Amino acid sequence: MEMTIDSSMRLVVVGGGVVGLSCAWRAAAGGARVTLVDAAPGSGASWVAGGMLAPVTEAWPGEEDLLALGVESVRLWPGFAARLGEAAGREPGLRSEGTVVVATGSGDRAELETLASYLDGLGRPVQRLSGKELRRLEPAIGPEVRGGLSVPDDLAVDNRLLLTALRAAAEKAGVAFVARNAAGVVDDGTRVAGVTCDDGSVVEADAVLVAAGAWSSALHPALDAMVRPVKGEILRLGHRAGAFPAPSRTVRALVDGRPVYAVPRDAGGLVVGATQADVGFDLEPTVGGVRDLLRDAERVLPGVAEFALLEVAAGVRPGSPDNLPLIGPVGPEGLLVASGHHRNGILLAPVTAEAVVAMLGGGAVADVVRVADPARLLRRANG
């Protein structure tokens, strides 16, 4: 059942990445008067992402709450994509072929077995495959790969098709776009009043949703230190005539302990990623990062050596202190945040948008989302 928001509510969404666009679209479709403030919607970390929807293959002991949240969101993804395609009048690029996660050396295989056993214990079994079985499934996988796991329910999406569709759906739902950067959220000490922009203008609001990714913490004192930038580098490869075909599934791998992934795109392309470094707001790709990604990808998928290197890019993901996102009210009345999703912004967009719309409409939030309440960080900070 669709949640309805008071049609007199003026909502300002700060941030035009996948989370901000998803929330703006769904809130406008629910009846709110929505304005999105972003100088370049659809850019940033969302633009350079791999597009994996992979809660199971990214699972790890101690992060059970994040796994549950991701599993719920990937369950929502097919319906979200269908609704988005209809609203936007264009396909959002969902891929349903599944994921394999593979390992090369004995240490990497042991780590994968730890993951498989952990998932078995949670009642989420995966299929263990030998190297030969993996190559029957995906002939692009090379001989250094000795074993792995098949996870058919971990999906993928073309992030750039998705962002284009979200922008179109938001516009058709009536979202107004302000092509400026936000400077801060304005409040009177009790409730929010709007958002100031970098040119000094103010966009008035009854409610403000901060979804500005790694830049979220700077927009209001209540968000201070809740979100930090985590740099990631990524490559886009194009298939060339005569090169071995790319895999049809997402291939995640451990190579000498280093994670690498290759996500298929239409026309035989691949997105290869991603490095990870806490180096602040550094948006320059490095030679070392590109070298490591290409070296590790080629060990798993030898045919990529014949692909074209189309793009090298870097972005900053929004990390949180405990790796869980921040979804909920914070600070003065009317201020909400949807940030801190780290590597999982695209994966968690449907469940985040659903929760935000429920909060704006006065409805119940799904239990699985309650672990993302930003109040948890305030409680820890206060002892």
Image (cartoon, rainbow, N blue to C red):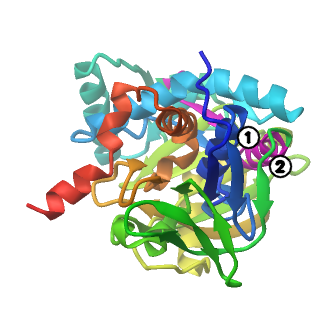
Q: Quick one: SS at disc 1?
A: loop
Question: 338 or 293: nearer the eye?
Answer: 338
Instruction: Decide which of 91, 258 is in the foreground and name it.
Output: 91
Question: Which residue in the protein does label 2 denote?
Answer: 239
Give the secondary structure at mark 2: loop
Q: Is residue 379 visible?
A: yes
Query: Is 87 displayed left or right of 107 in the figure?
Result: right
- Across and down, in percent, residue 333 comes to 41, 54
Q: Which residues are magenta?
A: 151-171
For badge 1, the amino acid type reads Ala
Q: Residue at x 43, y 45 (%)?
A: 104
Q: Which mark is residue 246?
A: 1
Comes first in the chain, label 1 or label 2:
2
Residue 263 at least partly seen: no
User: x and y percent of residue 253 in the render?
Assistant: 48, 45
Name the main secondary structure of what is drawn in magenta.
helix
Q: Residue furthest left?
A: 383
Q: Are marks 1 and 2 in contact (CB under 8 Å)?
A: yes
